[in-house]
Image (cartoon, rainbow, N blue to C red):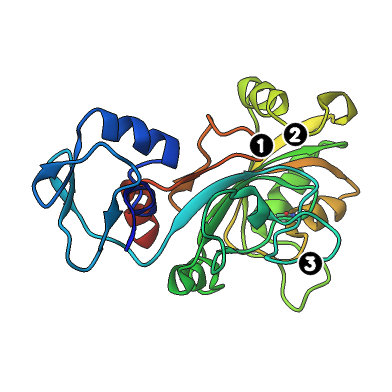
Amino acid sequence: MLRLDKFLADVGVGTRSEVKKLLKQGLVTINGQTVRDSSTKVNPETDKVTFKGQELLYQEFRYYMLNKPAGCVSATKDGLSQTVIEFLKGEPTRDLFPVGRLDKDTEGLLLITNDGMLAHNLLSPKKHVDKTYIAYVNKPLDDEQLGLFKTGLDIGDETPTLPAEIDEASEQDITKNLEKASISKDIISYSAVYNVVLKEGRYHQIKRMFEHFNSTVVYLKRLSMGNLKLDSQLLPGSYRPLTLEEISSLKN
Ligand code: URA
């Protein structure tokens, strides 16, 4: 048995506080009866729960997006630093893990789940899932360097990087992302900003690709992974469950 608000949050109806409001609006039934009390107990095996008239099937797997702030590590446990899992306050985090890693100073989209198969599919080097970043750097690349960045670079690994996309970021994107950064924008001293799309995820990859041209990444944020985009409403350090649409789009 589990609480109704947890059941609804786990299946992606909304956060616990959103779910409370939806319950008050009388949008949820258990076995045909409207239920407004979020502490009502549900047996996912035998009870029929509906939201807006649609039956909800309890899912074993849970999926959250975190807007990772700088200063925490993409791990489940760490003796010294705060972990990304610690931001999911009030959730049952025991079996959750981040899908891939962002560097300690990188911000932005991090998928957190207990679904090992999905994580494997998103991270498998063979699947070439797109990861989009905005990178603020201290030295612009010239046209020739941009061409090389797109073709693939020897950054000291066994094989060159796969072809990547790189474009100058728009003024709007530059300002919007800087305004929302968790570190003070005054210390981000940049001279060019790029949107970069990678089809792989090597250690410090973007930083090493720019460093190849003696350009240093001063601020890095991930904006999307596969079909999943960072919710622009999420402040650094905030998270929300994925919607049902987002979950199914990640599996396609
Ligand atoms: N590339 C990096 O250099 N760091 C990240 O965190 C992600 C991609």
**Residue 26 falls in image quadrant:** top left
Residue drawn at (83%, 71%) of the image: 156
Q: Tag 3 or tag 1, which sits nearer the N-term?
A: 3
Q: Nearer the viewer, mark 1 or mark 3?
A: 1
Q: Is mark 3 within 8 Å of ligand 1?
A: no
Residue drawn at (11%, 52%) of the image: 31
Number of the label disc, if any, that sits on residue 121 = none
Estimate the spatial distance between the alpha carbons at disc 3 and disc 2, rounded to whole Å.
32 Å
Residue drawn at (29%, 39%) of the image: 37
**Residue 23 falls in image quadrant:** top left
Estimate the spatial distance between the alpha carbons at disc 2 and disc 1, rounded to whole Å.
6 Å
Q: From the image, tell me which residue sits under label 2.
A: 182
CB atoms of marks 2 and 1 within 8 Å: yes
Which amino acid, mark 2?
Answer: Ser
Q: From the image, tell me which residue sits under label 1.
A: 236
For mark 3, give the secondary structure: loop
Estimate the spatial distance between the alpha carbons at disc 1 and disc 3, rounded to whole Å.
33 Å
Nearest the camera: 154 or 34? 34
Q: From the image, tell me which residue sits under label 3.
A: 154
Q: Quadrant of the N terminus?
A: bottom left
Q: Position of residue 165 (x, y in %)?
A: 60, 49
For mark 1, give the secondary structure: loop
Q: Is residue 224 visible?
A: no
Q: Decide if residue 19 is on the left or right side of residue 27.
A: right
Nearest the camera: 15 or 228? 15
Which amino acid, mark 3?
Answer: Asp
Q: Residues within 10 Å of mark 3 (few under 14, many from 20)?
A: some
Q: Tag 1 or tag 2, which sits nearer the N-term?
A: 2
